[in-house]
Image: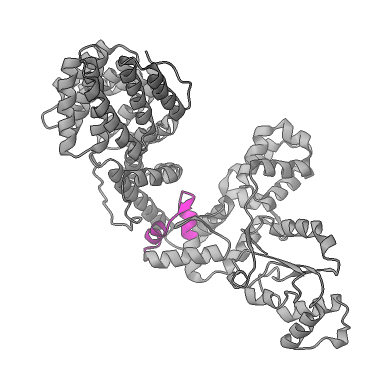
Amino acid sequence: MVLRGVGGVGKTALALFWLAKISASHPDGQLFAELTLPTGKPVPAEDVLGRFLRALGVAKEAIPTSLAERTTLYRSLTAKARLAVLLDNVASAAQAKVLIPASPGSVVVATSRRQLLGLVATGAVPVRVDPLPKAGGLRLLASYTGQARVDAEPENAALLTRMCGGLPLALCVVAALVTARPRRSLGWLVERLRDEHRRLDVLSVEEDYSVRATFDLAYEDLADESKTAYRAIGLSPGALVVPELLATGLSADVEDAAEALESLVDAGLVEEFDEGWYRAHSLVHVHAKALATQHNGDATAVLRRIVDWYVATIREVSHTLMPARPVQPWSSEVSVELPPRLAGAAEALDWLERVHGDVVQVIRTSLDQGWHEPAYLLAHALQPLFVLNKQFMAAIEVCELGKRAAAVSDQPGREASMRKHLARLFIEIGQYESAEREIRATLADAVERQIPAQVASAHKSLGLLHQTRGAHDVAVADFRTALELLPGTARPWTRALLLLSLGTNEVDAGNAQDATEHIEAAREIFREQPDEYNIARADRELGRARLALGSPAEAENLMRKALAVFERHKAHHEVARTHRALADWARHGGDQVVAQRHVDRAAEILGGPGLAPS
């Protein structure tokens, strides 16, 4: 077996533990060899064979001098033996091959940061050793410090585990530091580790128990091109890396970047967790960043190219998700290597959900660097993701960051845009006072600056607030005001969204006839874009209007057509809303069983109780 993983992950400890458990089934002995010196230099295989032969009872003077002769003698001696062999820190497959006993009854465990494909190709079983999950990390910490200290500060204990990224070596250093200072709290060490720049210093107490030294050893073994790629990964604010991102950061070809990533995988510094997607352990990332900032190079220029890659890519993927949505102008408009073309909205949504956490880090880094335009553009480009997945708290975080970035720009419309998004998010989570505060601030600023489009947008937000509170007549009045104030130069798409909101509330206010007119007008504009997602929204609301006007068959057809689109877009909340509309349709026809089925499906999607339609 080949146990592989990042340095300090506990490969040797796991091998020793497992070999001890099976020792009874290998009665002819156990052999152990460290195959890499502390300097990183491989131990010659003939030296290890000499030690193995002496351990097997061969007199010193009877041991051959050449590697070939020692290998032959070793295989002869082990042909019928049942041995357990641990080859630790293997430098290469060739180094390990000559140390494998000849008998099929023996077992060999090789540990390495490298993949050792030469061993796997001849039948070895690869086993990836991952960092400990939270529970395992806490158990390891408690085994040193005592359970009482962990129980006394559960939040700080969890923080220590997270700061160590579950890496056993780092956790053991943390435990040693805590144990050596019995009067200090776990919180004391959390504060020492909070500063990312000092974290590796704290976790490197001695050369043989040093997280930094472990990573330094792997880094020094890299070729120059791979070292450059490693440092660039450290500069990337996010945890995930794709070849296109690295290529932009390095100003290199995608093929070269992909090759560099593979070399880092081989070195055990980066893992490929999905096809074309890579990531480094959190402490490896800290190590790479420290090297990048110390290196005499253009670290700021590399970081800016990485940020620009995110801006260009997120804007492109966001446009794929919602092609009719306006794209904000970007003063740079740099050319970058984009990921392989995404086939449609579903793939774009999956891609954005995967990178969302990293994009937030890129926004924060951009703000720290004073790059306010990229921060705003990223916050704006993420909005379609939140429209579809309804992750309201994550969306609020991004909009707050976007508002900070927009506040220092010379484009007041950008701050108004972020306030608008914030207000509507606060409406969604029931924080109506916060929503109204943002709307009133936007409205006052727009009136003072005499910007009709922003005044209209603020009235639309007020309409949505009244809609959520159930005051549909008041909401209709606000939407009508917004339509009246909307400039003739406004985009048709913007007008269509207003018409749709107006029609939706007219249905709920009992004026289905006017609602039909407004929703059909909105749908025609969406068809000209084309905007499949909002066409589906219009179809569902038109279905509700038709139901109110006594046309249940037409209503059902419109609702089911909308449902198919929302399911294809993975717009789960819209799917749930459409099931609720279908529940009303079924109830209108007197079929309470079907109505409850739709209600239950909506509740299942949203994770809440299924309430009878009313």
Query: At 12% from the left edge and 32% from the top edge, which residue is drawn?
Result: 489
Q: Is residue 131 left or right of residue 481?
A: right
- Toward the left, the furthest residue is 488
Quarter of the rendering occupied by the N terminus: bottom right
Q: Residue 367: in sight, yes or no?
A: yes
Quarter of the rendering occupied by the C terminus: top left
Q: Is residue 57 left or right of residue 318?
A: right
Q: Nearer the viewer, residue 394 or 497?
A: 497
> Which x, y percent locates residue 331?
25, 48
Q: How is the image coloured?
A: one colour
Q: Is residue 192 magenta?
A: no
| Image quadrant in which you'd find residue 417 | top left
> Which x, y percent locates residue 65?
78, 88
Query: At 61% from the left edge and 47% from the top edge, which residue is drawn?
Result: 165
Query: At 23% from the left edge and 11% from the top edge, which residue is drawn?
Result: 510
Q: Nearer the viewer, residue 221 or 366?
A: 221
Query: At 33% from the left edge and 23% from the top edge, which residue is drawn?
Result: 582
Q: Residue 459: in sight, yes or no?
A: no
Q: Is residue 256 left or right of residue 481?
A: right
Q: Nearer the viewer, residue 29 or 580?
A: 580
> Which x, y percent locates residue 82?
81, 70
Question: Start and end of the magenta stretch?
Answer: 231-252
